[in-house]
Image (cartoon, rainbow, N blue to C red):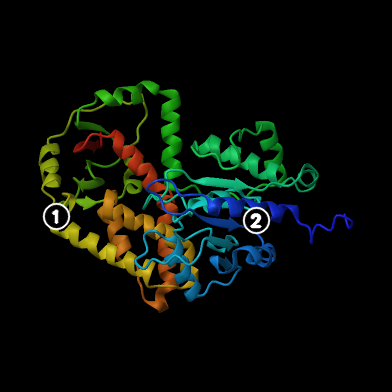
Amino acid sequence: MSRLDLVKHDPKTACLVEHLQEELAREPAKGEPQRKIIIFSEYVDTVLYLKEALTKHFENKMLVVAGDLSSAKIAQINKNYDASYAEQENHFDILLTSDKISEGFNLNRAGMVINYDIPWNPVRVIQRVGRINRISKKVFNELYIVNFFPTEQGAELVKSREIAQNKMFLIHSALGEDAKIFDVDEEPTPAGLYNRIQQNPDELEEENFYNKALREFIRIQKDHPEILANLENYPPRVKVAKQYTEDELLVFFKKGRLYITELSYTDEKPLPETKAFEDVFDKVTCAPEEKSLELSHQFWPAYNAIKNYKPYMPGGASEQSLEQKALNQLNTLINNVQAQKLMPYKDFLRILREDILHYGTHSEYSLRRISNFSVAEHKINETIKEIEKLQNELGRDYLERAVAYQKKLKKDIIIAIENRIL
């Protein structure tokens, strides 16, 4: 090993330099800008080592983040790598960084991610790629992922590729990932996955609402495929009654976003209330063999009361003002609040903003929660807790799922479900 002098004659770094020069010299595709490049390493020491090696070749065209993330550097990153940022600059072609910015940043002016090392946790790899694969603004038709793996001898010692790849198999199997992160095969064996997970168990996390709903959907898909097949034939207006522990009406209205309104029959003067799906999920589920009931005499008055409920109807003045307030809070948190502890959540905040501006899948309940985010410096910890709570409930990729599902639905769908005590 000493005779090879791998520190002075590092073939891995030499390979990186050579291909960086080739890529930066490449002519951009028609209608696309010059492709910037992001190099990720899990270790700050590696970043500092590469900084010295790469500066010799790329001089001042490289921005380096090695644990230091000041407000000035955050501004440089946004101006040079975020295609949606108001102030655009073009001072840097390469961003060399640790996983410090694997979350919370739009880096979509870059079209290539180079993983100089592979973290044990493949979610980190997904987060890195997510910096350039942005839903907010498409810059490149094709994005490239370049991975450096250990040699056969090194891989035998550290098993990093096997561990990460086996965990990626679990992610693909559970979530159906479309993108291949490590390589085109990406098919590690279930036996290998089992052995690796047994050796390195992760801490179990509490199941969020999306996972709960997804698990139920997968069960129905497997046990009763005829239900999903018949959805195409359902009318755009569905009214049904079923047995439950309360007398109430739930109306689901789909027009841009999903609106859910509940009206209880037990109150003396019942008023409609806007609900989130997670609040009523258990109220609308039922067994496949459960028989429908006749609608009660209270159904039509309650149904009309909900239809005439102003906050429920899309485009109303109250909703527009609520949307604008939520949008104002998000813009301030994204653009003006530079607290470092907020950075991991900015990516999610941008998704919330993108939803309001272009897709409109938020319920009024969610909009109200967003509009109540405080932008005050002394309340930043409280705000982060609320953001984290909403992120856990919705899921980081909720908008992609919602938009994909929205494309399959007809507009103006109304489903009215009456719960009855017998």
Q: Residue at the right extreme?
A: 3
Q: Position of residue 187 (x, y in %)?
A: 62, 33
Q: Compare residues 190 and 223 and report the one nearer the observer.
A: 190
Which residue lies under the disc numbered 2?
A: 17
Q: Amino acid at mark 1?
A: Gly
| Quadrant in which the C terminus appears | top left
Which residue lies under the disc numbered 1?
A: 316
- Secondary structure at badge 1 equals loop
Q: Quadrant of residue 232?
A: top left
Does residue 194 appear left or right of residue 103 in this picture?
right
- Secondary structure at badge 2 equals helix
Q: Position of residue 38 (x, y in %)?
A: 55, 57
Of marks 1 and 2, the one in the foreground? 2
Q: Is residue 205 visible?
A: no
Q: Quadrant of residue 89?
A: bottom left
Of the image marks 1 and 2, the number of the one nearer the N terminus: 2
Is 38 located above or below residue 301 in the figure?
below
Does residue 402 appear left or right of residue 203 in this picture?
left
Is 336 located above or below residue 168 in the figure?
below
Query: Mark 2 Cα within 10 Å, few/some/many (few <14, many 20+)?
Result: some
The residue located at (44%, 73%) in the rendering is 338
Does residue 263 appear left or right of residue 84 in this picture?
left
